[in-house]
Amino acid sequence: MAEKSIELDSVEIAAAIFGNCDRNIRLLEKEFSVTAVCRGTMLRLSGEEANVAAAVRAVEGMLLLIENHTPLEDQTMRYCLSLAHDGKEQRVRELTEDFVTVTVKGRPIRPKTLGQKEYLKKTAIGSHDPLCLKV
């Protein structure tokens, strides 16, 4: 059995990783067959070596999303976990780089998947400067 510890920057980040009622961490545990325990800002993952490595990659992807102010909603979490399964968790950063526009409340509208990002590049939305802003 393998074990890996990840130091999180703050308790708020730990709370975001775990999600509302621990929903995110339960999904991570189920998806990768690992056990996650958090004490303060130290997150410890344990399980089979390959599963722990994949779960660590998923947490790194989640941290990238949090770092770029992207909320960890159900769809975002599932997409992040699927990318981690494929070893492509670094591609999560691509989702947070560009945004199409900003809502009235100041929230950026971003593509939620890499497929949506590619679609935006190929359509008029992505090719017109007034509509497509860079962060």
Image: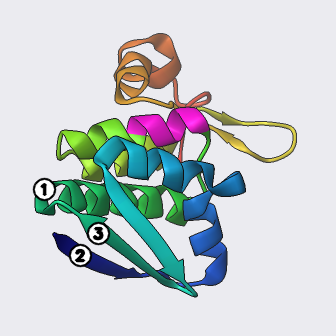
Front residue of 89/37: it is 37
Q: Magenta: predominant secondary structure element?
A: helix
Query: In the structure shown, which secondary structural element does the residue marked by tag 2 occupy?
Result: strand
The residue to which callout 2 is attached is 3
x 22%, y 54%: residue: 54
Q: Nearer the viewer, mark 1 or mark 3?
A: 3
Task: Check whether the beta carbons of the residues at disc 2 and disc 3 lie within 8 A of each other.
Answer: yes
Magenta highlight range: 74-79
Residue 78 among those drawn in magenta:
yes
Answer yes or no: do the residues labelled 1 and 2 have beta carbons within 8 Å?
Answer: no
| Mark 1 or 2, nearer chain start | 2
What residue is pinned by disc 3?
A: 46
Q: CA distance from mark 1 to mark 3?
A: 10 Å
Tell me which amino acid carries mark 1: Ala
Q: Answer with the quarter of the image where residue 83 lies.
A: top left
User: Reading the chain from its start, which is encountered first: label 2 or label 3?
Assistant: 2
* Residue 66 in sight: yes
Examine the rendered structure and indicate whether residue 37 appears above or below residue 96.
below
Q: Quadrant of the N terminus?
A: bottom left
Indicate left or right for 115 with 126 as reference: left
Q: Secondary structure at mark 3?
A: strand
Residue 101 image offset from top left, x and y in percent: 66, 34
Which of the 4 image quarters holds residue 53? bottom left
Read off the residue under disc 1. 50
Distance from label 1 to label 2 (Cα)?
A: 11 Å
The one nearer the camera, 106 or 92, is 92
**What amino acid is found at the position of numbered circle 2 in the picture?**
Glu
Task: State the CA–CA distance, disc 2 to disc 3.
Answer: 4 Å
How many C-alpha atoms fall within 10 Å of the one at disc 3: few (<14), some, or many (≥20)? many
